[in-house]
Image: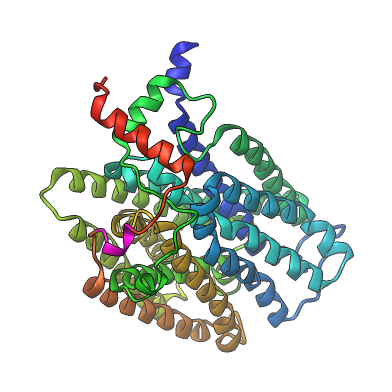
Amino acid sequence: MSQLSEFLTCKRILVALFFLGFMLHHMLRINMSMAVIDMISNRSNMTEVQRFDWSEEQKNDILGCFCWGYTVTSLVSGHLSEVYGTRIILGSGVVLATICTLLTPLVASHLSYICLILLRVGVGFGLGMQWSSVMPIATKWIPPTDISKFLSTILGSQLGAAITFIVCGYLIKAFGWPSVFYVTGAFSAIWCLAWFYCVYDSPIQHPRISEDEQKRLLRKVKYQANSVSAKKPWAKIMTSRPVWAIIIAMTCINFNTHSVANYMPLYMNQVLNFNISANGLLSSLPYFATYFTAVLSSFLADKWNKSGYVSLLVVRQIFTVGALWIAAFSLTVESVWGYNYVVSVVFFTLWQSSAGCHSGGAIPNAVDISPNYSGTIFSLGTSLGSLMGYLSTKIVALLVTNEENFQEWRIFFWIISAANVVAAVVYHIFASAEVQEWNNTSVRNEVEQEYADATELYAVNAKPN
């Protein structure tokens, strides 16, 4: 029993729940992308499952309205987590998204299209709490040299997407589209119970952490104050070039990932003519590749950072600028030969997998330049990225009047490719890995002061194990 408790440390449980939580994030987010194919299709043999006569504009709004709620909470969740803690903010958001997901079949079948829109906005509202809430808790549990590795757990969302595409394809074929929402919602409900029982905002606050683990963490983790009472230096944050380099890079990352999540299954169905099972399997491949690149890039980023042979800024630029150029190249090829199913699968995979490189680049860069306000910076990036995700649905609605016509899709690919080029240039010129002078303006509350004092005490007096 003691060996099990030594292995299942509070930190490892925290990392595991973050990983699973971000898998569920994408499950709840993209389940509609698969389900909508069956919800409007007349090709299924399951006549007892209701279908809907939605227009193209209505279908695009159903896919895009998630971003409305996501944008609002992404903008504030980082700040709220800095003030109230990640545990309550992130956990409450996933609870809301879970409830909305489980209600989706009932609302879609028995209420109006507008009610379904509101429910999807609710899913976005809840999940928007998740991404930006990571940074404040990371500064209390994770050593700075391991931050890229930890933040790769948020790319667990890519495995969630991969599994969702595969499982949803078979669920829809066997049981119809409602099963997609019941299954993903049930898994999410179980996760919520585990989250509130196992996760706390710092080692000091955790009621079941061992004294040995607490001491080890407080020796290794460099405390960074997160203030509830200080006036945030908004003017300096909003006029900081390194901040905007991160925001623009993250906005483009989200533009890429939202576009893939919303339209890859539809594109494979309408242009490449894959059936629902093959669609789910092939749509999952880019997400498996993305998780692989996320793990690899975060490992390399932390290794190079620890070695001291490469500056941290160069590390961040390698993975961010490189990923953006790979995405731009992939989309350019897709715009020329995307009618070929082999080319599409290969370059969709390359396009999406490039997003994994950001776990060693722009994503942890917010912690590099401002540990105290990294949640706020992350909020700004994810919020603008979510707006771009919604914009992508409007671009498709404007450009793609016939979804089976590849020539109309290629303009959409050009637009996203150009966005990646602009983001790469901006990040290369303006990025920084130095802590900014406006970072150290916060005032600690009692809990944070206790944590800071304990960290300093253990760091100075405790002997390494």
Q: Quadrant of the C terminus?
A: top left
**Quarter of the figure with residue 115:** bottom right
> From what the image shows, is residue 277 above or below residue 432?
above
Please check the rendered image and state whether residue 336 is part of the magenta-colored stretch, yes or no: no
Please state if 158 lies on the left or on the right of 247 as rendered: right
> From what the image shows, is residue 406 above or below residue 367?
below
Question: At which x and y percent is residue 179?
Answer: 75, 50
**Quarter of the figure with residue 423:** bottom left
Instruction: Give me the residue at 63% from left, 53% from top.
Output: 93
213 or 12, which lies in front?
213
37 or 3, which lies in front?
3
Count the numbered circles shown.
0
> From what the image shows, is residue 259 above or below residue 148?
below
> From what the image shows, is residue 419 above or below residue 367?
below
**Quarter of the figure with residue 425:** bottom left
453 or 172, which lies in front?
453
Q: Which residues are magenta?
A: 435-440
Instruction: Give me the residue at 49% from left, 58% from top.
Output: 78
